[in-house]
Every structure is written in structure tokens, then in C-alpha cells.
Amino acid sequence: MSTEYKPNSKLDPNAKFADNERLKTQSNYLRGTIEADLKDPLTGGFTADNFQLIRFHGMYQQDDRDIRPERAKQKLEPLHNVMLRARMPGGIIKPSQWLAIDKFAEEKSMYGSIRLTTRQTFQFHGVLKPNIKEMHQMLNSVGIDSIATAGDVNRNVLCTTNPVESQLHQEAYEWATKISEHLLPHTKAYAEIWLNGEKTETTEEPILGSTYLPRKFKTTVTIPPNNEVDVHANDLNFVAIADNGKLVGFNVLVGGGLAMTHGDVNTYPRKADDFGFIPLEHTLKIAEHVVSVQRDWGNRVNRKNAKTKYTLDTFGADAFKAEVQKRAGVEFEPSRPYEFTHRGDRFGWVEGIDGKHHLTLFIENGRILDYPGKPLKTGCRKIAQIHQGDFRMTANQNLIIAGVPADQKATIEQLAREHGLINDEHTVQRKNSMACVALPTCPLAMAEAERYLPELVTQVEGLLDKHGVADDSIILRVVGCPNGCGRAMLAEIGLVGKGLGKYNVYLGGNREGTRVPKLYLENVGEDVYLPALDELIGQWVQERQSDECFGDFVIRKGIVAEVKVSKTDFHA
Ligand code: SRM
Ligand code: SF4
């Protein structure tokens, strides 16, 4: 198979490639001069191309935006540090691994937190340059890496958490791991740089190609009826199809993605297209060739239009699918029926088919830290010290203590309660709300998200209570910018940061995560959107049909138009 990059035939042949293409080409398979930068004591940061290249190794250079002005006043460079994101297919982590990451977060990171993400893994924030190698070596010693969790590659592969509630979970999880391994970069740059591995020469990247992918690429393995992973946020989805409780294959959905740029109508959130069913044995071949077609056809000139969703809209989904079939030598069969009914986590205890018990904990914003009166991190540590099963990170930033024998249930529940990990006062609304990280660590944030969400939820809880539906909930998501990391573009109410205290308000996603919402209010503050939501929630309560969700209601009443085809409808 060719690994050569063939320019996308729909582009101007004279167009200038994005600079990221140059840096990938010149990087010697992602090595760059990272090792020299690591030894440079004059700056806490990474320079030139290395700033981008460390992303392929799972790190982003950041600085705390709250203290940036003060440091500038003192003529100091920003306090450079890195955020690390681990590779954790399906979000499963052993207690011994948890204890190791807890220790590192506590002792060697500026913020001390373990941040669960919307893609079933954890991030350390605030790791200073002298501690980076030690961090990777610690992770390696417990069997964790951060290869390809960022950059123009296939990222952490998600898998519906559904702990052993379903017979399919174990197999689906194994597929998520196999897909993750199959699509990893082949370069040994990570081991060489961070683990002092033997220096080798990389001569080819058989699947990703020598210039890697045009843009980030995201994959899930999903077990209906739970759409916790939000398939429509992902480039490639394998939706598990069972026959008599046995996994027989997958429906393949391609081309989802949620990011856009304010003011640029050529960018939009888009749902994935259904390519059809494949039997299990073709899974890796199909994964490889969806990636290879995107590798060769994706836009390498304009990074804002480089994701698979735009490749599908440029060439047509049918042409893309035909090329995948040709390269893989596999014909998609007609899709098999399935249904998504929900996306939220099921909190509290459930008993699995194996007789073990699983406790889902709500972690507000996924931020595990010792707060005053709520020592979540200590609680998780104490549980990890006695737990015999595993932990599972959900795509909703929550945590499952999975595989608890009946005789340990009471002890684990008591620890969880004592440390604020179970709080019966949390409403369904709070548990169905989500935000991205945003300030102070995210360099792209235009507005608050994680730090604002708890307060906003209190306001929305007040509105639900006022209208007599305090036990009801609306999927509410806030993101600090239109990149949409907290998946606001699949929410019933999505707030997208525009400036400090200002948001665009989108309405009309549904509970199942199968509809993109539409702009309702632009660049407004609480003084505008809270009264507007008050009125709409009032109307919904009065006029809804049986258990119609808020998102369906606003579409039925024409409060916003339905987005059927993103390319034409989203900005119309
Ligand atoms: Fe994200 C960039 C955080 C899930 C779309 N995302 C970032 C960065 C790394 C900012 C940067 O580039 O410097 C953020 C770091 C903030 C920080 O301080 O930690 C960031 N993204 C996150 C996380 C941690 C949000 C969270 O609160 O959990 C999620 C980490 C996932 C993971 O473990 O891999 C996260 N990001 C998402 C999602 C949701 C998803 O995948 O389910 C999306 C939308 C789906 C999609 O990709 O379409 C998302 N992040 C982006 C984008 C826009 C990509 C695009 O298509 O244009 C960027 C910016 C970029 O890539 O240029 C971005
Ligand atoms: Fe940062 Fe924007 Fe992603 Fe929020 S949505 S974490 S502000 S890039």
C-alpha cells in the first residue's frame, strides 16, 4: 500500500499546504528536536515545531491564563508547563494504576488534579519541564502511555462503559483496544525520547503515512442503546450489532465532528453517515481504510476544513464509501437495526451479569481534586487501596468503580459518601450537565466553562423548580469556544463561548444525541439568556406532549429550525 501523500484532487494544485504539513514532513517521524529542548534550561517551554510535535506524544504546552498578566508585568515569560492526556482505550484503569497517577498528580503537577475527559481518559495539568520524563517513565512502569492522544492521528478509542451489564462489553472493549493498537503510529519516537529507548530509524508509517493524517481523527466502539460516547462527534464509529446476545459485527458510521469557527460558514458540526454493516472479521481492515482514504483525500491546505466530515462533504459520502470498499476489498452490507435511547450515565449501583456490582459516581466537570469539605481525590485513593476490580472513566467525565464483590459494597459506598463522591442532593439536571476545561489552562478559551457550569446549573435548577419540574432535566453543555470539547453541539441547550461572560446559545439537540442544535441567541450574557430560558422552559412544561424532551419541543414548535443537513441547514 502506498504511503505517499496524494494531493486532494478537488483542491487547487498550486495551493500552499498548511504549515503543519511541513513540520510533520521535517519531523523525522515525530522526533523533531524535542530532546534538545528538554535540555534547554533557558525556557520552560518547547520551541518552534516541537511545540506542535509534543502533541503527537500526548502533551500540550500551556500556561495559567489567570497569572499571565501578572507575570508579564514582572517581565517573566509565561509559566510554561504541559498538560498530558493518557491513552486509555475504553477508559479502563486498574486500582494500582490509579494509585500511581494519583501520586504523580499530588506530588508533581501544579494543580494536583486528575481531570477525567469527555473521551474516557485522564489529564494531568501543570507538569513542569523537569518532571516530564519522570511522568512518562512512571506511566510506562504501570503500563500506560500517551501515544497519539493528540495531533493528526487516531486518538484514544472510546467504548461504551456499560460495565459488564451487557455480555457485549468485554468483546466490544477488546475491539476498542485492537483498533487503537492497529492505528497507532509505528515510529518509536515516544519510547526513544521519553523512555530512553534504543535509537532506531523509522522508514515508514504503513497506515498513517509519512505525513500522518490531515487532522485529528476520532473513533468509537458503541453498544446501543447507550450513546454515551456521542457517535456524531466522531470520525469513525463501530456500532455493535448482536445476534442472540453475541457480537456479530458492526454498523459503521463515518464523518461526525462538532467543531466550527465563529463567523466561518464553511465550518459546522456534522453528524456521521451510516456506511452499513460489516461482520467482525473485517473490523480492522475497515478501520484502516477509512483512515487511509481520509489520509489521502483529506484537505491538507486548510486545517479548518481538514477533518473527515469535510472530506465527505467535498467528495460525497458515496464516493468516500466506494473508495473504502475498494481499498479494503469489503462490501458494506445493509445496516442492521439498532436504536439509541440515552446518553447519560446510570448513577449508583447496578449488578452486572457476572454477579459483581458497579458504582457510578458523578464527578462534576470530571475534576478529581480535594475540595474543602469534599476530598474527592483522597476518596478515590482510599477506594483504590482496597478495590479489587477496576475503574472506568465514562465519556461524560464520570467514574465507575467496577467489579465490586457483594461483601465489599458497603465499605466502598461508605468511603464514597464520606469523601463527597456520593451526594444525594445532586439533581438529575446537575448530573446531565457537562462543560469543557476552558480557563485557566486552555489557550483557546474565549469564555469560562468548567468554572462557570456549577453556578449555571444552579440557575437552571431554579428555573425547573419554578416551573414545577425540579426532577426533570435538560441536556445542558457549556464550552469555552466553538471547538466544542464538551460536546455542546449535541446538547438540548448548548452554550458556546464568544467572549468573557458572553455565549452563543444553541437549542434543539435531543436526548439520544442524534441531532445537531441550532443558533438561538448570539453573543449574549446571563441577563439575556436566563430570562429567555425561563420563558422557554415555562412553555415546554405547559405545552409538551407526554414526555417530550426540551430539545424535541423547541423543534416541534419551530422555536429553532431543525438541522437536517449541516452543510446547508446549520448556518441558514
Ligand atoms: Fe478538545 C483542543 C480539551 C474533547 C474538539 N481540546 C483542545 C485543547 C487541547 C486546546 C488546545 O488545542 O490547545 C483543550 C485543552 C484544555 C485543557 O486545558 O485541558 C481541549 N478536548 C478537551 C477535553 C479535555 C475537554 C474536557 O473537558 O473533557 C477533551 C479531551 C478528550 C480526550 O481525552 O481526548 C476534549 N475536543 C473534544 C471533543 C469532544 C469529543 O471528542 O468527544 C471535541 C469535539 C469533537 C470533534 O473533534 O469534532 C474537541 N478540541 C477540539 C478542537 C476542534 C477540532 C476541530 O475539528 O477543529 C480543538 C482545537 C484544534 O484541534 O485545533 C480542541
Ligand atoms: Fe478549550 Fe474551546 Fe475545547 Fe473548551 S471547547 S477546552 S475552551 S478548546
Image (cartoon, rainbow, N blue to C red):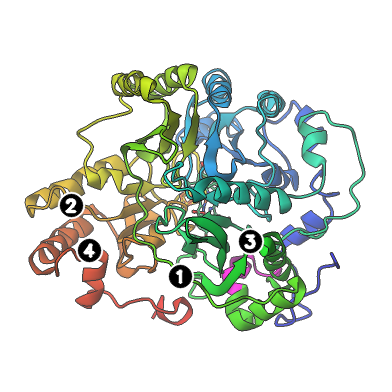
Which residue has dot 3 on it? 280
> Whole-Å distance between the Cαs marked 4 and 3?
38 Å
Looking at the rendering, the stretch of residues picked out in magenta corresponds to 299-310
Q: Tally the marks.
A: 4
Residue 121 visible somewhere in the drawing = no
* Residues tagged 1 and 3 counted as in contact (Cβ below 8 A): no
In the image, which is nearer the foreground, mark 1 or mark 3? 3
Q: Amino acid at mark 4?
A: Phe
Q: Amino acid at mark 3?
A: Leu
* Residues tagged 4 and 1 counted as in contact (Cβ below 8 A): no
In the image, which is nearer the foreground, mark 4 or mark 3? 3
Q: Earlier in the sequence, mark 4 or mark 3?
A: 3
Q: Amino acid at mark 2?
A: Asp
* Residues tagged 4 and 2 counted as in contact (Cβ below 8 A): no
* Residue at screen point 53% across, 31% down: 71
Which residue has dot 4 on it? 550
> Whole-Å distance between the Cαs marked 1 and 3?
42 Å
Q: Earlier in the sequence, mark 2 or mark 3?
A: 3
- Image side of residue 416 versus residue 170, left or right: left
Determine whether 210 is above or below 111 in the image: below
Q: Is mark 3 within 8 Å of ligand 1?
A: no
Determine whether 247 is above or below 86 in the image: below
Q: Earlier in the sequence, mark 1 or mark 2?
A: 1
Circle 4 crowding by C-alpha within 10 Å: few under 14, some 14–19, many from 20: many
Badge 3 marks a residue whose secondary structure is: helix
* Residue at screen point 45% across, 43% down: 394
The dot on residue 472 is 2
Which residue has dot 1 on it? 263
